[in-house]
Structures are given as structure tokens and as C-alpha cells.
Image: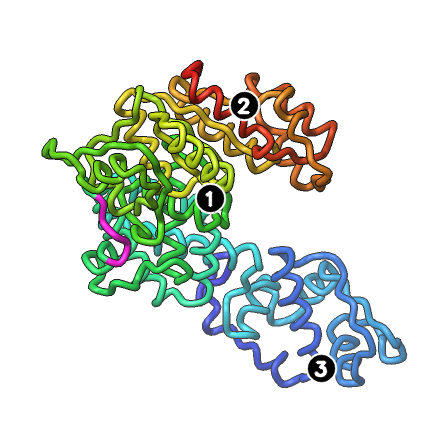
């Protein structure tokens, strides 16, 4: 055993202290003090010491403490007392180490050693990282980024199980971004041979999602929160061409035309347009299309499904040629991908939503993503005042608007914050219809 001072003390005869059991409480306190402070010093207080302890201390200290209910031992005085014994050539630390048969270690030293072991553990995975995505993730783990907290907690619970997860996640990250869309179960099966390995809610799914989110934060400054909602999860995966669900994820469309990668026309959209049919187009079909076109190079996006359906009725009745999309509140992946393809085809988006925090947030989000192609449609103070309801908006919802930096809808946000009441699109129906018919927007 190597002592703190570097002196070998294997042959140190500690039997004197071992035989006198009264020393044991004192040596336990020595060990506790070193654990807390990384050194021995100050005063050791022994409450209600046994007669054996009082006898042992009286003998070595040369002070009678047998009548004391509480004994205080100065470490300095105890070390001086040792100079008059056979232990004069050894330090107190060496004696205590020999007494317990182990090296004294402070909590700080133990923690530092654990942290070093953890760092080495994670560094071993660098050899498997083949791209920046995987390397960024490992660096973030070592640096204890907030998005890696779950990994560190898992390390403390089960390092062996974590090893398997890290291997598989890194293997998956090495494949990203995918050149073509891959459904999540297929991505998992190809990566791990288990189609459910990266299911949302599993440990491995959470680790993969956090790694993807961290990469988006580092490379694009985009951050969703540590617990993204279902829509955000779908969006995160989609950024790397992983599709979470391409059947139940759809977008409602009217008056659109589509073309496949080879230039052929989508008969599905063609017949829907010819028959004036409103369609719920699944994400599966959206991503198959190479190009999507709208009439007059513009599409009207309506948040409220009831208003959307009523406008369609009027448009069909009055034989107005127009392209319209219903977002039904917050955009899902199918809606985003559809708008992506319209914008890629240099089409303009006219967006109209409800006058509530969620509608304003959506308006801000779509403008941020397509600043040169999105036009607000009746998202102004006058329209808001004409649509006021009696519904009071709670403060927690209003607070979501405080960080929006968007001059175009700034006055509307101010009015909403002051009025604290929702406004709904339905009252704008006649105005929206007239503007669609006239083609003024």
C-alpha cells in the first residue's frame, strides 16, 4: 500500500492501536475528516465516549479525560504525542491508512476519479464515430451538455446496458443524414436489426433524439426543449430524412397539382382538381412528389378547418379557381413538406390564422422559415378587433408571445396582450372570400 506521503507502510506495526479498542472511534473520526476535507487537522470531538476510549486517550495524550462526558482531541496535539512513541517516524495519515488497511481518500478525490473513469468510458467510443454528427454527440456527453443528462444518469444506473445503446446510436448517427426518406422502423432495423429499437419513449430512442437535437442546436441554433412534443419529435427526425409516421400524418389540400421525380403527373391530385375534391394527402404521398404546383403560383393556407370547408363550398359554387391548404392548427410534417415543395417551386403562401397565442406562434414560425414567400393575410389589428370573442386568454398562454421579434405582427401581438381575448377567423369569411375571388392578393 502506497501512503499519501509516498512512504511504504506495509510493515508498520499497528497492533498497539488495534489491541486497544478504545482508539477505534477516534480513528473513524480521522477517516471521516479526511473524507470531507482531504486533510487531517482541527479538533476531533467525541460525544459520550466509552471508558475504553477515555482510558486509551488519557494514556497517549498524557491528560486525564476519564471524567469528561465529551472529549475533544486536537489533531496537532495527537501528532505531537505520537512523536514520543514508536510511531515517531510516521505521519498520522500513514498510521490511519495502516490502521484501516487502505489509502485515505477524500470525497473530492473519489469523485474526480469517477469523473475520469467516466470520461475514459465515453472517449472509447470516438473510434466508432465516422462523421461530425456522431463526434459532436460524444463531445457533448463528455462536456455534460444539458441534452446529455439522460445519458449520464443512465451511466450511473447501468454502464453495460448503456454501452449497447451508445454503440447502436453511434452506428445510426454514422448513417445520417439519409439521402432518401426512411421510415423510423426501417432505419432501426437496418441499424440494429430491431425495428422497434429507436421507438419514441424507449431509452435508445431518447438518446438518438437528443443526439439529433443537439446537432441541430450546434449547426443551426435550433432548440426544441429537452422534452419535445410529438410534432417537434416528428420534425427533428424529418430533418435527417427519418419519417416517424407517413400514413396518419397528412395535410388537407384543394386545387393542387403534383409531379413525380421522373416528371410524370400525379393522377391522384389531377383527378382531385378536376372533380373539385378536397383531399387529405398523406406524408407518404407528399414525399413521393418531386414538385407541387398551385394555381396562379400561390396557395391560401387557412388554420381553421370549419372556415376552410365553408370557403371551399363557396369557391366551388362560384367556380373560382384557387389552391388552398388547411393546416388545422399547428403544422404537422406533411404540411411542412408540402409547403417546402411549393416554395421550392417559387410559389407564394398567404397565411391566415386564429387570433390566439397558438395561431400567432404559428404565423411567426412559418414567416421565419420562409421569409420571402409568406404573406400574412388579415393578421392585423383591425381584423383582430372585428373577430373578438369573449374568451379570456390565460397569462401563461399570453407569455408565449413575449419573446417574438417580428415587426410585421408586432402591433397585433401588443393588441392581443392588452386585450387578452381570443379572436377567430370565422368572422372574416366574407372578406377572405371576396379577396380570393378578386385576386387582389
Element at badge 1? loop
How dense is the environment of label 3, judged by Cα within 10 Å: few (below 14), some, or many (20 and up)? some
- At 51% from the left edge and 59% from the top edge, which residue is drawn? 110
- Of the numbered discs in the image, which one, if any, rests on residue 345? none
Q: Answer whether residue 184 is magenta in the image.
A: yes
Task: Tell me the residue that label 2 is attached to.
Answer: 431
Query: Which numbered disc, 2 or 1, marks the residue that appears first in the sequence?
Result: 1
Q: Is residue 100 above or below residue 81?
A: below
Q: Which residue is mark 1?
A: 145
**Would you identify the image quadrant in which residue 336 lies?**
top left
Q: Which residue in the structure is indicated by mark 3?
A: 22
Residue occupying image coordinates x 62% and y 61%: 34
**Magenta segment boundaries in residue numbering:** 181-185
Q: Position of residue 157 (x, y in %)?
A: 45, 66
Of label 2 and label 3, which has the lower sequence position?
A: 3
The answer to whether residue 159 is visible is yes
Q: Residue at x 24, y 32 (%)?
A: 257
Q: Quadrant of residue 368?
A: top left
55 inside magenta stretch: no
Q: Is residue 325 above or below residue 1?
A: above
Judge left or right: residue 305 versus residue 30: left
**How far is disc 3 from disc 1 in space, using C-alphas?**
50 Å
**Who is closer to the viewer here, 204 or 96?**
204
Q: Gap between marks 2 and 1, in whole Å? A: 50 Å
**Residue 117 percent coordinates (x, y):** 40, 57
Element at label 2? helix
Q: Residue at x 46, y 33 (%)?
A: 311
Q: Mark 1: give few (<14), some (14-19) or many (20+) Cα within 10 Å.
A: few
Amino acid at each position: 500500500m502506497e501512503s499519501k506521503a509516498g512512504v511504504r507502510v506495509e510493515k508498520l506495526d499497528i497492533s498497539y492501536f488495534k489491541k486497544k479498542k478504545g482508539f477505534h472511534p477516534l480513528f473513524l473520526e480521522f477517516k471521516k475528516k479526511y473524507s470531507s476535507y482531504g486533510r487531517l487537522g482541527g479538533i476531533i470531538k467525541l460525544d459520550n465516549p466509552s471508558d475504553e476510549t477515555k482510558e486509551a486517550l488519557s494514556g497517549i495524550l498524557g491528560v486525564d479525560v476519564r471524567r469528561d462526558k465529551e472529549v475533544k482531541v486536537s489533531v496537532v496535539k495527537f501528532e505531537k504525542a505520537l512523536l514520543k512513541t514508536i510511531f515517531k517516524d510516521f505521519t498520522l495519515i500513514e498510521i490511519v491508512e495502516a490502521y484501516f488497511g487502505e489509502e485515505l481518500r477524500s470525497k473530492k478525490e473519489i469523485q474526480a476519479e469517477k469523473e475520469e473513469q467516466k470520461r475514459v468510458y465515453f472517449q472509447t467510443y470516438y473510434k466508432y464515430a465516422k462523421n461530425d454528427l456522431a463526434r459532436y454527440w460524444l463531445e457533448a456527453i463528455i462536456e455534460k451538455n444539458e441534452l446529455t443528462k439522460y445519458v449520464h444518469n443512465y451511466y450511473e444506473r447501468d454502464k453495460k446496458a448503456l454501452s449497447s445503446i451508445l454503440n447502436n446510436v453511434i452506428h445510426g448517427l454514422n448513417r445520417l443524414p439519409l439521402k432518401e426518406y426512411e421510415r423510423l422502423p426501417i432505419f432501426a432495423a437496418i441499424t440494429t436489426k430491431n425495428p422497434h429499437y429507436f421507438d419514441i419513449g424507449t431509452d435508445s430512442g431518447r438518446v438518438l433524439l437528443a443526439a439529433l437535437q443537439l446537432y441541430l442546436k450546434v449547426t443551426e441554433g435550433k432548440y426544441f426543449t429537452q422534452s419535445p412534443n410529438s410534432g417537434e419529435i416528428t420534425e427533428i427526425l424529418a430533418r435527417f430524412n427519418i419519417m416517424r409516421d407517413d400514413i396518419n400524418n397528412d395535410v388537407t389540400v384543394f386545387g393542387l397539382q403534383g409531379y413525380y421525380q421522373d416528371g410524370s403527373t400525379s393522377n391522384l391530385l389531377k383527378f382531385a382538381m378536376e372533380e373539385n375534391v378536397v383531399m387529405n394527402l398523406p406524408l407518404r404521398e407528399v414525399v413521393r412528389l418531386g414538385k407541387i404546383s398551385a394555381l396562379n403560383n400561390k396557395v391560401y393556407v387557412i388554420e381553421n378547418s370549419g372556415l376552410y370547408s365553408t370557403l371551399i363550398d363557396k369557391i366551388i359554387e362560384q367556380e373560382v379557381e384557387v389552391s388552398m391548404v388547411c393546416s388545422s392548427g399547428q403544422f404537422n410534417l406533411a404540411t411542412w413538406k408540402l409547403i417546402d415543395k411549393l416554395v421550392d417551386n417559387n410559389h407564394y403562401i398567404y397565411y391566415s390564422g386564429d387570433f390566439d397565442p397558438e395561431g400567432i406562434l404559428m404565423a411567426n414560425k412559418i414567416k421565419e422559415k420562409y421569409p420571402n414567400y409568406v404573406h400574412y393575410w388579415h393578421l392585423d389589428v383591425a381584423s383582430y378587433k372585428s373577430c373578438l370573442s369573449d374568451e379570456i386568454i390565460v397569462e401563461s398562454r399570453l407569455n408565449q408571445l413575449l419573446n417574438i421579434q417580428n415587426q410585421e405582427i408586432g402591433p397585433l401581438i401588443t393588441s392581443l396582450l392588452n386585450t387578452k381575448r381570443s379572436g377567430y377567423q370565422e368572422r372574416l369569411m366574407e372578406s377572405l372570400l371576396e379577396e380570393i375571388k378578386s385576386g387582389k392578393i
